[in-house]
């Protein structure tokens, strides 16, 4: 199972080989996937190689060979967009009383995942995409500090839009009135921008990571909980950095 970025890189390498007869350089791959560093490309290539999709040819520069392509590669190669999300796949769940009041209601995948990683959809689910599981959202570390985490979860492809995604395990009950429970697996789209009312992964002072609702109050940023037992925290704009936006939840029963 490939992550979305692995899939995009594999298709790009295939196109480049077909057009130029040689694999792209790391700089070309970094630019094509809009990544910030070559280390990200290295991780993607290693993942593709481990899964048997590409092979590095020894003693040759820029020597990558595409061994195989996933079954749904034709749509991507011809530039087709991914299929739209079917409404039947995701059912609204959780506590909706607080959610509706704040204009947010999570999408939750229900099911018994006892034979999977915590919060994971069984790998047998058709159309699943593997995304990194970076740990607990209240771990107190920047996302970058756990990016090499070796766990992953399988997520239905129609939960994801274009772009890079990762998963975090929710710790605590500060967002319970928005239907986000302790132990849920939060599906996060990586982004550094968000709108008022979005539930975001926020990095505070480069040390603390938290999942809260974003509100801008003049020049300040408020991180709102969805639990009356917790207080809203207000920070200067230089103290908070958006690391992702919540797009879905998975829950074990």
Image (cartoon, rainbow, N blue to C red):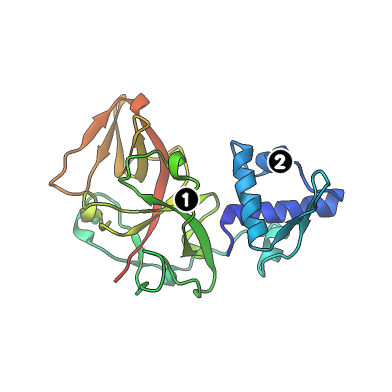
Task: State the residue in front, 219 or 121.
Answer: 121
**Disc assigned to residue 91:** none
In the image, farthest residue toward the left: 229
**According to the image, label 2 marks what residue?**
26
Left or right relative to 81: residue 234: left
How packed is label 2: few (under 14 Cα within 10 Å), some, or many (20 or more)?
some
Residue at 77% in and 45% down: 24
Circle 1 is placed at which residue position? 149
Residue 79, image x and y in percent?
A: 69, 56
Question: What percent of the width, then of the height, locates residue 11?
Answer: 70, 56
- Position of residue 92 measured from the top left corner of the image (x, y, whole percent): 32, 65
**What residue is rendered at 24% in x and 51% in y?**
175
Q: Nearer the viewer, residue 50 or 120?
A: 50
Q: Quadrant of residue 220?
A: top left
What is the secondary structure assignment of the residue under circle 2? helix
Mark earlier in primary sequence (2, 1): 2
Task: Report the Cα–Cα distance between label 2 and label 1.
Answer: 22 Å
When the figure is inspected, residue 247 is found, relative to residue 158, above or below; the finding is above
What residue is at 22 percent from the left and 55 percent from the top?
176
Asked if residue 25 lies left or right of residue 129, the reply is right
The structure residue drawn at horizontal position 20% and vertical position 37%, both measured from the top left corner, is 232
Name above or below for residue 72 compared with residue 193: below
Numbered disc 1: secondary structure: loop
- Residue 241 % position (x, y): 39, 33
Residue 109, placed above or below residue 201: below
Horizontal side of residue 141 vs 164, given as left or right: left
Looking at the rendered image, the disc whose residue lies closer to the viewer, 2 or 1, is 1
Quadrant of the drawing holding the C terminus = bottom left
In-image side of 25 versus 185 (left or right): right
The quarter in which the N terminus is drawn is bottom right
């Amino acid at each position: 199972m490939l992550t979305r970025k692995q899939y995009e890189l594999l298709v790009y390498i295939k196109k480049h080989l077909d057009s130029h007869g040689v694999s792209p350089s790391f700089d070309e791959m970094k630019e094509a996937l809009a990544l910030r560093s070559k280390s990200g490309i290295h991780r993607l290539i290693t993942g593709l190689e481990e899964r048997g999709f590409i092979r590095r040819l020894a003693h040759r520069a820029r020597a990558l060979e595409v061994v195989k392509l996933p079954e749904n590669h034709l749509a991507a190669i011809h530039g087709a967009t991914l299929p739209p999300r079917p409404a039947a796949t995701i059912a609204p769940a959780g506590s909706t009383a607080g959610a509706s009041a704040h204009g947010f209601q999570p999408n939750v995948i229900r099911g018994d995942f006892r034979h999977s990683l915590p919060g994971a959809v069984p790998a047998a689910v058709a159309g699943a995409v593997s995304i990194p599981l970076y740990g607990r959202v209240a771990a107190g570390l920047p996302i970058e500090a756990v990016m090499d985490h070796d766990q992953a979860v399988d997520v239905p492809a129609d939960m994801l839009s274009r772009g890079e995604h990762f998963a975090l395990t929710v710790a605590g009950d500060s967002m319970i009135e928005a239907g986000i429970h302790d132990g849920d697996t939060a599906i996060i789209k990586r982004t550094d921008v968000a709108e008022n009312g979005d539930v975001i992964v926020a990095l505070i002072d480069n040390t603390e990571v938290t999942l809260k609702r974003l509100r801008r109050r003049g020049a300040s940023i408020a991180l709102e909980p969805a639990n009356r037992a917790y207080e809203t925290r207000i920070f200067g704009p230089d103290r908070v950095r958006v690391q992702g936006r919540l797009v879905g939840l998975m829950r074990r029963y």
